Each structure stands twice: as structure tokens, then as C-alpha cells.
Amino acid sequence: MNLRTTSLALTAFALTACGGSGSDDETTVTKDISLDVSAVVGATSVACGELTDVLVGTGNEGNGSAPDFTDFRLYVSEIQVATDDGEFIDLELTQNDWQHDNVALLDLEDATSSCASGTSATNKSISGTLEGLSSDEYTRVRFTIGVPEALNHLDRTTAVSPLNIDGMTWSWAGGYKHMRLDVDGWKIHLGTTGCTLDDNNENLDCSSARPNRPVYTFEDIDTESSAIVFDYAALVEDSDITTDAGGASGCMSGATDPECAALFTNLGLDVTTGECASEGCDSQTWVRVE
Amino acid sequence: MKGVTRRPGFVLNNRCVLNKAASFLIILLLLLSGCRESTFDSNLAQNVDGASLLRLSVQGGFVLPAIPEENPISDSKITLGRHLFYDTRLSGNETQSCESCHEQALAFTDGEALPQGSTGHTLALNSQTLTNVAYNGSYTWWNPILIRMEDQLFIPLTGDEPVELGINDANTQEILQRFRDDDAYQILFAKAFPDDSDPFTLVNVNFALASFTRSLISDRSAFDKGEMSESARRGEALFFSEKMECFHCHNGFNFSSSTVTENTRFPERVFFNNGLYNLNNNGSYPDAIQGKFKVTNDWNDMGAFRPPTLRNIELTAPYMHDGSIATLGEVLDMYAAGGRNIESGEFSGDGRLNPFKSDFVSGFEMTPEEKQDLLNFLFSLTDNEFITDPRFSNPFTSELSE
């Protein structure tokens, strides 16, 4: 990492207020941070049950329809931040029931109402330590939605939290649901598909799979007040969440599922390859940092 | 694999000609046996240490199935699994057990084209037989990467699309508590998992069910015993002929080319399109289930399904992955025609022309006599001892046999 000695960095170090714990190198900063997360439908917070006052998507002759949420959970991983002109450095996640290795489960359902199959516990933040930041003021953040490949095929009978939650496992695909945003009758399950068995015919080989792990980068963020916002209304803006033209009900990452095309475009993903779309994953329209 | 010993004794292959000495010995054994249980004279059958309930018959001549090191099999696990298998308390709303879709009398199927889950979801796939499921090369009808029974079992237990037993993140602890509060289960769980301070976990439920299901070995049919009619023998010859090609997909002792044993080093996990559908004249199968294609997204895998065992096939109607053929006779007619032509309706299309169809489903001429011979051969794979074996029966309605 290319360390830069600037007066800004030194000043920032001096001003570190958010749990800053000092540094071995006077030119870098070590900092504990917590990123808040929220899920919204336009201007309304996501909540279990039918949100009767909000209409989303193209259903109901283009007027949109009210989502009846039954689940809203996703894994995020490989979280990194950077200053304006520095390199991205890893956020070392605090290891706890919600965070293992470099992956965190965000749980925005509370098992009430129509989310009755979920967990009552929720998790709306990501916490960790930044080490080696050249300035206290990071302005860019980057993360992946999904469980990294190295952790995606754990034995679910022995995996630790949060990688041992039945509702987030995805038996048929040999991994996890990277994200499940379900409304009654129309479910979004994003996960890696297309793994095969290796030459020994015994172990999973996902080298040719469709990873379906979008990586999003955000710039010009405010270090102290930033929160990651997932907007369901923007995600399904071009979808009719009341009908299913084929495949799984909604989109469960099927490359040929008619419901997946529009959804993957808004995720910034190429539905055929599962990689970032040709315009880049940041062509996505549904996640913002504010 | 650990913990396995081979008891000395001879294993007969029924397709070999028995020599007189062996025949005499068999007759002697039969004369000496006073009850059905003697079929499993443990001095003659292969056994796994500590798992006497997993038995292979002498006549069948099977080798042991592979048993994963992380879930060693034991009688106490099999016994716990048997209770759980038949207990409706295992479903979220206490309305279904595994038996609801897997009845012993029907070789652990349910007689339905498509079953319903505990909350009313209709499944897209026909309930499969659990006959010899320990030997499956892969699990479920279509998935090429589900190769451990323990991984498959979570689907009926916790699957939510569709819901089967309906265990979910919200009710798991409540369901486990039903067993924790039951005196009999306290003993069963403690015996099955003696090293666990709290044995009441969903993983242990899974491991016990897997152990019981592995013990469901069917190897005492007329075919195994060499008690086939002349017609059935003619049918066997037809089955294994290049004229009818049946054996290409239904090969080996389990009559499924997707079969592995503890000795298998190069497993074959095969999937075939047998020409049931041809939607839009481009080879498509109905959206609900398109076979191995779902995983690979490779059109060559469109409509490709795992060939099921043909053991007990007489008992497992209706047939095919979606239960869309009612009788075994119609199945033979379908293969004779080289696929199925659906002339009208939402699934219309000539499956015989499906571009992804297996080369082995090319059709054949079959006289009425040949058809009957083939049927009689398939009927000779019915194992009446398997479907009445008290080891596999509902422990809540029958006396424990062990």
C-alpha cells in the first residue's frame, strides 16, 4: 500500500473520535467503525407484512402493487473503504454471531406477521476495524452482496453462525442464498448457480459457475453519517411482483427465468454469466449510501 | 470407511449358475431356518459394526453402501431415525411425517402423481421410492451436485419453495422441544448421540433420518432369490438386450446406472432425457422442472433426470419425475415409441423428436408377449419382504422388532 504523508492524515489522526485506537505508523489510522444499514421501499421502511400505502413495480396495469414482505436477509462481504485518492483497504469484521470471517449477514426481518418463517433477531449494521487507512476521512466504500466462494460451500451441519441459518442455505445449488428478498408470491433468491462436480466427481467445482455476487462501489460518502440503503422499490421497478411468467415464482437466479432479466439489470448483473453487466455492477439502481 | 468388518461367508450372485454344493448348502440353510429373520443370518451377511439393523441378504449379494465418516451408522441412530421418520411432530404444523409421502407398503412412495407438503404446496416432482437410496449416485430427480443424503434431507425438512415438512428458522426450536419433552425420545436421542451434551439438534435429526433411510435395503426379490418365472427370464433377456436398451440407464445390481457402493472409486452420476416432452419444438420441458438443466443451464441437460432404481417399480406408480404416466405398461409403450407425443394442451409437443433425448431411447418393436415378459421381469424385482419388514415399519403402530 502506498502510504502518503499528508497534513490531512496527521490531522485526521489527531481528531479521531470514533473509537480510534491509534496506530503503529504515524501516517496511518486505525479506526473501529460501524456502518448502518436500512431497507426501504421508496420512502417507507421495509417491514414484515403488507405495506398497503406503497405501490411498487409494473403490476396492476402499471400502477404498481403493494409488497407483502415475508423475508429480507442478505449476506455482504469483502467490505472495503478508501480515501479520495488512496487504495481500498479491507474492513476487518468484528467476529460475532452476525459476522464470520469477511462476511456479514444483514437481517431486516423480525419474524413478525408474514415473516413468520424467519428469525426474530435482526441485524442492521456492519462493524469492524480499519487498519492502515491513510486518513480518518474515507470517502469511498465497496462491498459484495453474497457469501464469498471460499465460504460458500461449507458443510451446513458444522458451519458456524451466521453461515448455519437454515433459511439462508440453498441445498440444490450447493451453497447459500446470497440474498433473499421475498414478498408473498414473488421471491428473489440470489445465489451462485451452475456449480458442477470436479474431475473426481466428488467435490464442487464452481469455476464455471454463475457467481451472481454483485460488487458495488460508492463515492463521495460522508464518513461519519453514512448508511447503506437497500431500496426494494428501485430493485423491482421494472418487474410485476404479482405475476410469474415461468420458472420459479419470482426470480431464483435462473438464467432463463423470465422474471430474472429485468431484476438482474437493476442488480447490475448479466443474467447469463452471473458477472457484472457490461456497464458494470455500478449500473445498479437500488443500493445507495447516504 | 471406518468401522466395517466383513464377516466370512459366501455371497451368491443369482445370475451365476449355482453349483450343486452351493445349492445344497442353501437348501440346508433354508431347512435350518425357522423364521423369516434367518434370511439375515449375520454369519453370512456383510455387517457394519454396531449397526446390525443394516442388513444385506445373502441372495442379493450386494456390497455395502458408502457411509460418510461424519455420520457413522449405528443401531441407535437407525432406531431414532425410524421413530422420527414416522412422527408427525417433525413437521411444523404436526400434520405430516416422512411417511406421508413415503409409505412402506408402496416401497416408500405415496401413489400420487404429485404430493402435497404440510402447508398445502403441491410439489413439482413425484415422491421417489426410498428403495436402496443409500446407493444413490446423486439425490433428488434432477440435481447433479447433491451427492450426500444428509444434504438432500434438509430439503424435505427445511425447504421453503415448496414447503414440505415446514421446519423453518422460526419454529426449529419449538419442534426440537417436542422431542426434548418426550420421555421416549430422551432415551432415543441420548443413545443415538451419547457424546452430545444436548443431542436435540436439527443436524442430529438429519443424521438419524439418514441412518434409518440407509438401512432401507431391498435385496430379497424373486429376482434375487432366483425364483423367476420363464416369462420373467425372457423379459430379463429382453431388458439386457441391445434391442431394447433398457440396461444402459438401469444397469447394475440396483437397476440404476446412478449407483455407488463403498467400493466405487469412479462414480457415475448419470442423467438422461427420455423424450417425455418437447415444448415449442425446441426440446424444452415444462417450466416447473427441467431436469439437470436447472443447475448447469446447458441445453444438453434439458429434461435430463436421474434414472431411478427399478427395484419395487411395480409398487411405485405413477411413473416418471412428474408422475405423468399411470402404469408400467404405458411406460413400456412410451419407450417402445421412443418417447411421448403429446398432441394437445399446454404441454403439447412430440417428445420423440426432442433434440436432447438420450440415444438409447430410440424405440423398438415389442410384441404383446414380449411386453408381458418385460412386465413379469419388472414384477420379479418386487421385494415383498422389504415392504413388510418390521425393521422398517411404523414403530408407533407396530411392535418393535429389535
Image (tube, coloured by chain):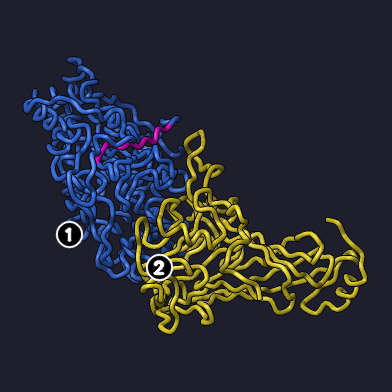
Of residue A21 and residue A278, the one placed in the foreground of this image is A278
In the rendered image, is residue B312 in sight? no
Going by the picture, which residue comes out furthest to the left? B369
Q: Residue at x 34, y 35 (%)?
A: B356
Q: Is residue B269 magenta?
A: yes
Q: Chain of mark 1?
A: B
Q: Is residue B29 magenta?
A: no
- The image shows residue A266 at horizontal and vertical percentages of 53, 63
Q: Chain of mark 2?
A: A
- The image shows residue A8 at horizontal and vertical percentages of 89, 72
Disc 2 crowd, CA 10 A, few/some/many (<14, 14-19, 20+): many
Disc 1 crowd, CA 10 A, few/some/many (<14, 14-19, 20+): few
Colour assignment, chain A = yellow
Q: Nearer the viewer, mark 1 or mark 2?
A: 2
Residue B280: image quadrant is top left
- Specify the label residue A46 is tagged with: none
Q: Amino acid at mark 1?
A: Thr
- Specify the label residue A240 is tagged with: 2
- Specify the label residue B397 is tagged with: 1
Q: What is the chief secondary structure element of the magenta stretch?
A: loop
Colour assignment, chain B = blue
For the record, the magenta segment spans B267-276
Of residue A270 and residue B48, the one placed in the foreground of this image is A270
Count of numbered tags: 2
Give the CA separation, mark 1 to mark 2: 50 Å
